[in-house]
Image (cartoon, rainbow, N blue to C red):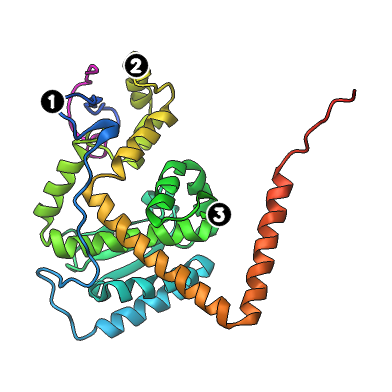
Amino acid sequence: MAETATAPTPVNQLPREQSPGIQLIDNNKENPNVWAQLGSATRQEVAGTPAIGVEAKPNNQERVAENTEKLEASGEVGQFLAGVYQAALEENPQLATAVIRTGSKTEDATLGKTGGYARHKDMNPDSEYSITVNTNDGFEHYEELLKTRSTAAEIATRKMGIDPNAMDVKTFAGFIFAHELGHIGDYMKNAPTRQLKDERRKRDLATLPVPGLDPSQLASYLEREDGQAYFASNMEALASKGINTAAELINVQETSYRKVETEDIPDQFAAKVMAKIRADKAAAIANNPELADQHIEGLRAKIDKLHESIEPVQVPEE
């Protein structure tokens, strides 16, 4: 068990000058549901289930129309996510009650390190479930997330059952958005009150290698002076786990994080939504020669880009 810092309050609840109490949880016999060998999260189906405590409102169609219009007016990212939204509604019609908000990292700092986030109805003044998604920074933002959240992207490919090489920026953006919609579905079914939501979240975060922080919070903390001091003071304990850099610690945190119930349920929902989108796209290509030609041209462009990124091999002269 590694040494712990003082004050066990999560970093997002502390003034910047304070250090969170972070305890590296070991994979020991007394607590097997931690570290890299977390027990399998309970699989709970979100799609198609009645929402607890949520009554269908008569203006659901208007809400869907407003959300769709908002997305379609938010550039190429929003236009793509509008299709993901429709597929998600087919999987879980109860999501029609949620509000979708668009933004950028300059408008909302949280969107700087993620593609979006969900909020419980009890956390919003209008008592509506909501999803805020980064559409205004373009696909360039998601290209950057593919680099900084590479572990999350890799885990997403496994949950979607696709080849890791098939994870492109649109697929990643779509998965993130569908994942946030999956959180709303999970709240509706399994945590209709904020108290229940917070209890489940606290329970799950407590099982992580660095308890109490999700990967984004941990990444932000490690960029700060007090976070760097924490990492330096725990280098010996971390090294014993094969962790020598902050990036490696974040990757380990991400791997465990994707296994907890409150993250796995939205991931499984997102995997279903993206599978539907792939199936619909395949059917459309099969039935439309023009789309098939466009698809082939797109594949050729990807291959050309890959070739450009490969450095030629220098063969030594004999």
Q: Residues within 10 Å of mark 1 (few under 14, many from 20)?
A: few
Segment tinted magenta in the rendering? 1-15
Q: Earlier in the sequence, mark 1 or mark 2?
A: 1
Name the spot of residue 198 as percent of width and height, x first.
14, 49
Q: Is residue 210 visible?
A: no
Q: Which residue is mark 3?
A: 140
Spatial distance from mark 1 to mark 3, Cα to Cα? 45 Å
Spatial distance from mark 2 to mark 3, Cα to Cα? 37 Å
User: Which is nearer the eye, 186 or 66?
Assistant: 186
Looking at the image, residue 114 sits to the left or right of residue 168; the answer is: left
Whether the residues at callouts 2 and 3 have beta carbons within 8 Å, the answer is: no
Q: Which residue is mark 2?
A: 240
Q: Earlier in the sequence, mark 2 or mark 3?
A: 3
Spatial distance from mark 1 to mark 2, Cα to Cα? 19 Å
In this view, which residue lies farthest toward the right? 318
The amino acid marked with disc number 1 is: Glu
Q: Helix, strand, or loop for circle 2?
A: loop
For the N terminus, which image quadrant? top left
Q: How many marks?
A: 3
Looking at the image, residue 292 sits to the left or right of residue 10; the answer is: right
Q: Helix, strand, or loop for circle 3?
A: helix
Name the spot of residue 304 as percent of width and height, x first.
72, 55
In this view, which residue lies farthest toward the top? 236
Q: Which residue is mark 1?
A: 30
- Magenta span: predominant SS is loop
Q: Earlier in the sequence, mark 1 or mark 3?
A: 1
Identify which residue is drawn at 30% across, 38% down. Answer: 256
